[in-house]
Image (spheres, rainbow, N blue to C red):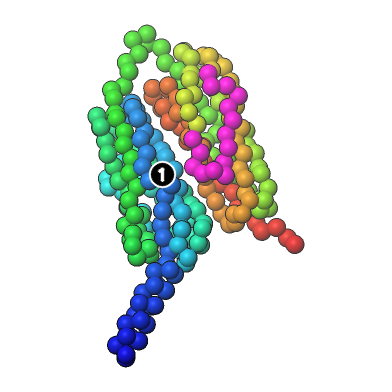
Amino acid sequence: MKRMVIFSILLLNTYTFAQNTPRITSPKPTHDFGDILEGQVVSHSFEIVNQGTTDLKIDKVQASCGCTAAQPEKKLLKPGEKTVIKVEFDSENRMGQQHKYVYVKSNDPKAPDFKLSFTANIVDKIINKSGKNPKLILNQNQYDFGNVDEGKVVEAKIGLKNTGDDVLEIKDVKTSCGCTAALLSSKKLNPGENGTIKIELDTSNRSGKMVRTVTLYTNDSSNPNQTITLSVNIEQRKS
């Protein structure tokens, strides 16, 4: 009888421990960049969710090669809370199919080294036989919103200009988190033409100093990816 009681207590403790643990998950732990030109820097944000019942602590994010950089937005997630890990891949001096991994080390006892992965197919740069090239110039690549009350949506407008001698095409615009939105005045700029990108930053449910990025992917062969860095200090609203 005594052994039965001890065994029951052990089972109960094991069950309680299993119920009161963090659990790291991702709705989409894999990503395919598809075909990219050699030399391009591409990025993707993986969503991480704590589906456990206690706090998830992200201790470290480790990439499988030096060409990849990853950094979590938040390192402590309460049950049900989400964060984003941005991964950048520099394809310079690489060619063909690539398969890379990023390991998220946390206090989840069942998945202490949670694995994210991405693939890409790197192809040769296209040679422009016409000799003409577009060239994107930003009137600024850094913008500081200063001190902002939590909950406000702040806006910045950055000027663009094509100083080259061919049509500039902005193929994609990617932001480092869902709290940032970007709107282009036009996806194509003729030689000498000006344009703008309007960037909105939502400060809801955030506090303290924050840095976010917006990256433009273009057909400017000399500088195809250009990044705008945004900074803000979010202050709690006074009651």
Instruction: Identify whether 158 is placed above or below 112.
Output: above
Give the image location of residue 193, x and y in percent.
57, 17
Image: 138 above or below 117: above
Q: Quadrant of residue 93?
A: top left
In the image, 82 versus 231, the foreground residue is 82
Q: Which residue is at the front of the view, 12 or 107?
A: 12
- Residue holding disc 1: 28
- Residue located 39% across and 69% down the image: 18
Residue 93 visible to an observer of this rendering: no
Residue 182, percent across and down? Answer: 57, 34
User: Taking 193 as reference, is 14 left or right?
Assistant: left
Q: Residue at x 58, y 37 (%)?
A: 181
Vertical position of residue 58 compared to residue 202: above or below: below
Which stretch is magenta? Answer: 174-188
Residue neighbourhood size for the residue with mark 1, other residues' Cα within 10 Å, grouped as few (<14), some (14–19), many (≥20): few
Q: Quadrant of the N terminus?
A: bottom left
